[in-house]
Amino acid sequence: MATMNDHGHIVANCPTCSGALTSFLIGDAQRGSMYGEIYRPLGDGMLEVYRLARCTGCGSGALITLLQSSQYDGGAPDLIDFYPEAEGRLEIPDGVPEGIVREFREGEECGEAKCYRAAAAMFRSVLDKTLRANGYKEKRGTNLEQQIDAAARDGVITAARQKRAHEEIRVLGNDVLHEEWREVTAEDVRAARQYAQRVLEDFYDDRPSVVALLREKGRTPD
């Protein structure tokens, strides 16, 4: 959650710094100047204020939205929005294929941009590609539901993870890809993201043991 200090600078997670917590400056410290500021009257003596800022780490721009009184009374304005802001990046085990990592990160970025339907589709794709990469697409016509159930039967994922993979990732992603339009919420995406990460941990945290189990079950992991 972005916070503002007494000088109007923002501390927030930066999307282009891989979600790192960093400072966003509202002006050039050497020149003492703002990058840009626009006011919008709201009535009742209040103003909405838009300011530009830049990340001290990567230099990317951001937009600060403030609420303040049109009559300066010495009080600090209220921070009401900051964009873009990352939610931080979930840790992914070493050894996850690069393409799956990129897909997971793109899902996180879609969620941060409030493109929740796109994020849901990305996390469904992460689940599907992870199962395929571990030998769960062995015959034509096998669908994602069957892949998840097979991984649970093999003991690679638990029954609890099987249930969550169906409910929080597969069904949500299928609704986005195949059903009539419906709203997907931030909470929906957070759950899909969390359980997609846990599935990656199931397959890649202790990779040698998982590979041995997969081969024992007749699977051919990439």
Image (cartoon, rainbow, N blue to C red):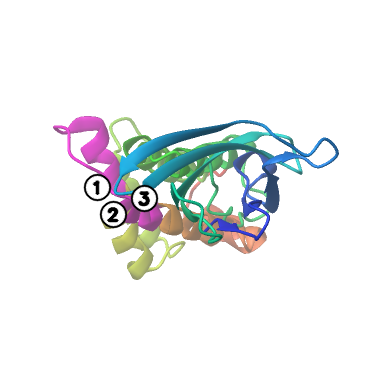
Q: Which residue is mark 1?
A: 171
Locate residue 16 relative to residue 129 in the image: left or right: right
Q: Nearer the viewer, mark 2 or mark 3?
A: 3
Kind of residue at disc 2:
His
Q: Which residue is mark 3?
A: 189
Q: Viewer-proximal residue, 186 or 192?
A: 186
Q: Which residue is mark 2?
A: 166
Q: CA distance from mark 1 to mark 2?
A: 6 Å
Q: Residues within 10 Å of mark 3 (few under 14, many from 20)?
A: many
Q: Relative to 71, does residue 55 appear above or below in the rendering?
A: above
Assess disc 1: are there few (<14), some (14-19) or many (≥20) residues with their C-alpha within 10 Å of its C-alpha. some
How many residues crowd around disc 2 within 10 Å: few (fewer than 14), some, or many (20 or more)? Answer: some
Q: Which residue is more in the foreground, 22 or 9?
A: 9
* Mark 2, secondary structure of its residue: helix
> CA–CA distance between discs 1 and 3?
12 Å
| Kind of residue sitting beneath label 1 | Val
Q: Position of residue 10 (x, y in %)?
A: 63, 52
Q: Is residue 216 visible?
A: no
* Circle 1/circle 2 CB separation < 8 Å: yes
Residue 179 drawn above or below residue 90: above
Which is nearer the N-term, disc 1 or disc 3?
A: 1
Q: x%, y% of residue 188?
A: 31, 53
In the orientation shown, which residue stands out farthest toward the left? Answer: 180
Q: Secondary structure at mark 3?
A: helix
Magenta stretch, residue numbers: 170-192
Kindly identify the amino acid type of the residue bearing the numbered disc 3.
Val
Q: Taking the image as drawn, is residue 80 in sight?
A: yes
